Amino acid sequence: MPGCPVEALLGIMGERWSFLILRDAFYGVRRFDGFQQHLGISKKVLSQRLRKLVSAEILRRVQYQEHPSRYEYRLTARGRDLFPVILTMMRWGNRWLAEPGQEWLELVHKSCGEKIEPKVVCNHCNEPLTLARVQALPGPSATKGAVRALRNATAKSK
Amino acid sequence: MPGCPVEALLGIMGERWSFLILRDAFYGVRRFDGFQQHLGISKKVLSQRLRKLVSAEILRRVQYQEHPSRYEYRLTARGRDLFPVILTMMRWGNRWLAEPGQEWLELVHKSCGEKIEPKVVCNHCNEPLTLARVQALPGPSATKGAVRALRNATAKSK
DNA sequence: CATATTAAGTATCATAAAGAAACCTACATT
DNA sequence: AATGTAGGTTTCTTTATGATACTTAATATG
């Protein structure tokens, strides 16, 4: 039983290739061979990860042909809803790990035409969320460990 | 050499415990023993991960006492800037993995006092970023594989 | 004075996960 | 008849993780 939502997410997505498979899915990759060639992952591990992502309902295994039967993997609503996680990862990687002016990729917003730097904000006041301004409180399912950690955290933040 | 910012980030943060160590750091944990007890990670792996996070400048190893000398681990600016990634993970985990009404933790915005659901928006137009409205284009450092994947992605998105 | 305890690790060995390469199945193509 | 294609599985080797014991330097306890 996980003790926090991050732990729960990592129980599904925490293994070595899971986020890269997801990233490829966002790029439009759907087929076993596509993932395998693009990622350079071993077939064994790929099939294990795909099975896990399917059983977690991040991907759906869909037959796209009979005789012989062939399947592909498509994002579910749950899977698509991981897009914000990938976006924040992309922003951080571009910001801190790319040579300046040498980013690997550029995100463009089709709505406004601008180059995006994804920003995480409060859904109420639309202010960017910083560590100092966000307080984590144990919820109804918090474990004892989490309650203790959060109590310490809020005690120390000054 | 990584081919995309997500890959680059995962080169640092991709191992089993790294994100949980980071989450604990956001909760205010700083000491070896604190991480070890709270996470239930083996000391060997913890010391390997901390070393890696320090060498990636996510954490700084700071002496907090002499005789005997003791060190603690503090978030750097780089590390603090991973907060948005953790926030989007928390939101996703709370949304899809918690029993309804039984979330593990609640985020409160000290600025507006409201319960937060972190939202990822465009830094120009402030609209939420959805898969359909974001276009990824290869940047200056994109690998051939990435260029091909992105071309396919944009070709297929309709 | 001897023994515990604390904090931050290392060392050693057993188990689990990942990677490489070959093989399998069902059909289509040359 | 042989080759190719797509989506895997099997087997074996290498690497990573986990459990337990030990180390070091100082303080606290009986």
Image (tube, coloured by chain):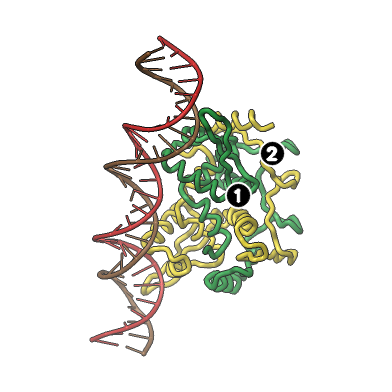
Chain colours: A yellow, B green, C brown, D red
Q: Chain of mark 2?
A: A
Q: Quadrant of the C terminus of chain A?
A: top right
Where D28 falls versus A75 (above or below)? Answer: above
CA separation in Å, label 1 and label 2: 16 Å
Residue bearing mark 1: B85
Where A21 falls versus B23 (above or below)? Answer: below
Residue A150 placement: quadrant: top right
Please state which of residues B22 and A5 is positioned toward the viewer in this rendering: B22
Percent position (x, y) of residue A123?
Answer: 71, 46
> Is B42 left, or right, of B135 in this rendering?
left
Residue at x-position 50% and y-position 48%: B52
Residue type at mark 1?
Val
Whether residue B9 is visible = yes
Residue at x-position 52% and y-position 64%: B1
- Number of marks drawn: 2
Residue type at mark 2?
Ala
Whether residue B102 is visible = no
Report crowding for label 1: few under 14, some 14 to 19, many 20 or more residues within 10 A (C-alpha).
many
Report crowding for label 2: few under 14, some 14 to 19, many 20 or more residues within 10 A (C-alpha).
few
Q: Chain of mark 1?
A: B
Residue A99 placement: quadrant: bottom right
SS of the residue at dot 2?
helix
Percent position (x, y) of residue B53?
Answer: 53, 47
Residue at x-position 69% and y-position 58%: A117
Please state which of residues A147 and A92 is positioned toward the viewer in this rendering: A92
Residue at x-position 57% and y-position 54%: A82
**Residue under disc 1 on the same chain as residue under disc 2:** no
Percent position (x, y) of residue A109?
Answer: 70, 64
Q: Quadrant of the N terminus of chain A?
A: top left
Residue bearing mark 2: A132
SS of the residue at dot 1?
helix
Percent position (x, y) of residue A141?
Answer: 53, 34
